[in-house]
Amino acid sequence: MNHFTKKFLASAMLGTLLAFSAHAATINIHNGGDTTSLDPQKISGDWEDRIAGDIFEGLVTEDAKADPIPGQAESWTISDDGLVYTFKLRDGIKWSDGHPVTAGDFVFAFQRLLDPKNAADYAYLQFTIKNAEKINKGEITDLNQLGVKAIDDKTLEITLENPTPYFINALTHYTAYPLPKHVIDAKGADWVKIGNIVTNGPYKPVEWVPGSHVTTAKNDQWYGAKDLKIDGAKFFTLEDQEAALKRYRAGEFDVLTDFPKDQYEWIKTNLPGQAHVVPFLGTYYYVVNSTKPPFNDKRVRQALSMAVNREVIGPSILGTGELPSYSWVPPGTANYGEPAYATWKDLPYNEKVAEAKKLLTEAGFGPDHPLKAQLRYNTNDNHKRIAVAIASMWKPLGVEVELYNTETKVHYDEMQRGQVEIGRAGWLADYDDPDNFLSLLVTGVPNNYGRWSNAEYDKLIKEGNNTRDLKARAELLKKAEQIALDESAAIPIYYYVSENIVSPKVQGFEDNVTDKHRTRWLSFKE
């Protein structure tokens, strides 16, 4: 082949590639924190869920408004007693390597999730399944006693401990995704590496650079692939909101999942219609380590909670209008009604501060013996702004605060290991039910970062979840919530609003109460 021919062919190929790349629709998403894993049983953050929910699909999945719809299962039936769910899988569903997805892959995944040796932090979300908790706690060692059975390759039967009104919702969570047994058996822990990993969702991961990004591409084996308008997504790790906004304005990002709150007025004026700030099911809170003196004294915890002037945080410190939180469960949560509230909620702020000072004095603290505390938060301008404000609210009590920040991955790892006195956390609903919030304070749950423990609370949660009558169940759960609030088990600060900025060229982005926006529902304007 002569030089001219080579040059001509190279030029033609480049032209074809450029034409293809111009046609290929990749959405660039600012994703915040760094992804810990592509294994859905090894993750815990909403930034990781955005990726997991694109590359995997459970029996049930979410529509554009985050309501549950059939996923890998085309249909299901529920027994009259509400205990047995029988799922029929879709015809022809496959992993991205072409291997069939079977009921056995779901059995394998649930057993792996609950096997204590795998130490999945979120295993407790599926404790409603028969024998799940006993297996996870090592009381039953035979994984086959778990209430998840493959009747045949296309039929899965799940038996519950008790009727559970939110179970279908819970199946949209990544703890209920199937896993490719044939790949995990062959590759072991390396199954999640690019080149090994296979997935069953609309997209598949094709590149993962820790600390930088995860890139996905359309999974042609997925049953709805022909309807996808977006060919892939690039999820960028970036915890600097100012830098993210600049990159969005430069056209480098199509969606921001957070922004500097002090820029909100500017954004509304200069990027009209692009900010999506709406209430959703989530609580921003501080945990207090109840195992460490003096924070094991409920008077100390209550004093710290009472001195937080929640009313100024949403309107003044953040500027995005978050509502003050005096309950653990956000108002409007399904199957609950009005939540319980801290008994001192409606006191004037000066009276709250006076009572807080009195409580600290009773606990042995004062000018000659100040309470010293380290307040941890994950690196983020908004978290820093709140931490600085709350530290100043505690100052009149004589509390000396050391602020300590780390990147998200390190922050949550250290919190789970109990390396915290006071720490910032946030909880965004996995499913719309009070249990999803209340279970965070159950003894021994890995996400109970403050290690608060109360036997009566645990008993009421269990009793409530064993109660089929929704009204009676809500009353029991509310009693438990009141105990947690009376004990200042944690410090709820505000109810979240979701804060996205979406390019006008992106279509199909639907605001919803769980802030889930799967790429499969998005498209670009022609």
Image: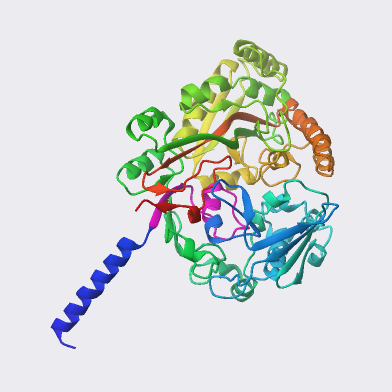
Residue 502 in the image: state x and y as whole percent.
41, 43
The residue lying at 63 percent from left, 63 percent from top is 72
Q: Is residue 202 left or right of residue 249?
A: right
Residue 61 sits in quarter: bottom right
Q: Nearer the viewer, residue 63 or 377?
A: 63
Residue 16 in the image: state x and y as whole percent.
27, 71
Q: Is residue 213 left or right of residue 131?
A: left
Q: Nearer the viewer, residue 215 or 157?
A: 157
- The vertical placement of 518 against 513, above or below, is below
The residue lying at 57 percent from left, 26 percent from top is 323
- The vertical placement of 26 against 488, above or below, is below
Asked whether residue 34 is drawn in magenta, I would say yes
Q: Which stretch appears magenta?
A: 26-51
The residue lying at 61 percent from left, 76 percent from top is 186
Rendering colour mode: rainbow
Q: Is residue 445 left or right of residue 462?
A: left
Residue 260 in the image: state x and y as whole percent.
42, 34
Extreme-bottom residue of the structure: 1
Residue 122 in the image: state x and y as whole percent.
67, 51
Extreme-left residue of the structure: 4
The residue lying at 65 percent from left, 71 percent from top is 181
